[in-house]
Image: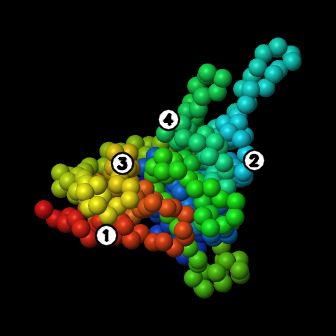
Amino acid sequence: MNDKLETVIQLLDETLLDKKSQVRLAVTCLLAKGHLLLEDLPGMGKTTLASALAKLLGLDYKRVQFTSDMLPADLIGTSIFNTASGEFSFKKGPVFSQILLADEINRGSSRTQSALLEAMAEYQVSADKITYQLPKPFFVIATQNPQDQSGTFVLPESELDRFTMRIEIGYPSREAERLMLTGGQKTDLKAILSTDELLVIQSDVENTKVSENAMNYLLDLVEATRSSGKIPNPLSPRATKSLLACARAWAYLKKRDYVLPDDIQAVFPYVAEHRMRSGVGTVGSGNSLSRMIIEMVDPIK
């Protein structure tokens, strides 16, 4: 693993106290060129994780607070008439950033939620019949509140499938919370990696080797979601690609240039659970479906 990236992870650990697993999963998602859904109660550190990651990587970062009256143009941008030139010019919205925090995405209307789809899938947006490319890297971190909170809308399956991984932050331990209250939390963050260095790391991750045994295990897990008859929403081919990309990134963080079945098992719940569930948004619902699938499939053949 790149030494600078290791430093980034260490500083993230010092910022988001007592959340080493969540930090590594978030970095895994970024290295896999995916998008991350943080699902938890308000005030758990979701925004802290997003802003700290942007600062340490030196990336352009914007935060958008989703509300019920938010319009797609508030996210993508809009055309403004220039009286001097007598022409319309496009003013880019916050989606034109390298890290976009879509805060409380399920408080936005379905129209606004769907405005993210093209950007997340194609890394481009269209306005006035013109296509605009988004910057590289482009990483969406969306936070979601529990469905039982007032003013929330259910994310449709098509949008959930766009999120490569989903994680929960959870409550800190008593000692971590004490450390936060007494000023032990890292706050003075500076860029460690450059954009070019991050893009090189993402390229290295894509070249991580996958053996025939590991590939078969991955495909067996996916097939089990489709044949068991117990999964409300079996995994799509997009999910299969996401699982492979995340397994490669996880192996890279483990300082290996090849994927093991253990790497696939490690990321499977966070890639698969939100796609397989019939209802997402109940904090603390765990990864029961993912664990069931893992127990059904033998990784050694």
Q: CA distance from mark 3 to mark 2?
A: 32 Å
33 to 152, vertically: above or below:
above
Residue 38 appears in the rendering: yes
Estimate how packed mark 2 is, as few (under 14), some (14 to 19) or many (20 or more) residues with alpha carbons within 10 Å: few
Q: Earlier in the sequence, mark 1 or mark 3?
A: 3
The residue singled out by tag 3 in the image is: 236
Label 4 to label 1, Cα distance in Å?
A: 33 Å
The quadrant in which the N terminus is found is bottom left
Q: Secondary structure at mark 2?
A: loop
Residue farthest to the top? 86
Q: Position of residue 28 (x, y in %)?
A: 44, 56
N-terminal of the pair, mark 3 or mark 2, is: 2
Q: Amino acid at mark 2?
A: Asp
- To which residue does mark 1 refer? 292
- Kindly check if marks 1 and 3 are in contact, taking CB atoms under 8 A apart as contact: no
Label 3: few (<14), some or many (≥20) within 10 Å? some
Q: Is residue 56 left or right of residue 250?
A: right
Name which residue lies at 60% across and 28% down.
126
As helix, strand or loop, the secondary structure at mark 3 comes to loop
- Mark 4 or 3: in front is 3
- Which quarter of the picture shows residue 85? top right
Q: Is residue 137 left or right of residue 297?
A: right
Disc 1/disc 3 C-alpha distance (Å): 18 Å
The mark closer to the camera, 4 or 1, is 1
- Label of residue 213 in the image: none
Question: Which image quarter is the C terminus in?
Answer: bottom left
Between the residue at mark 2 and the residue at mark 4, the CA separation in whole angstroms equals: 26 Å
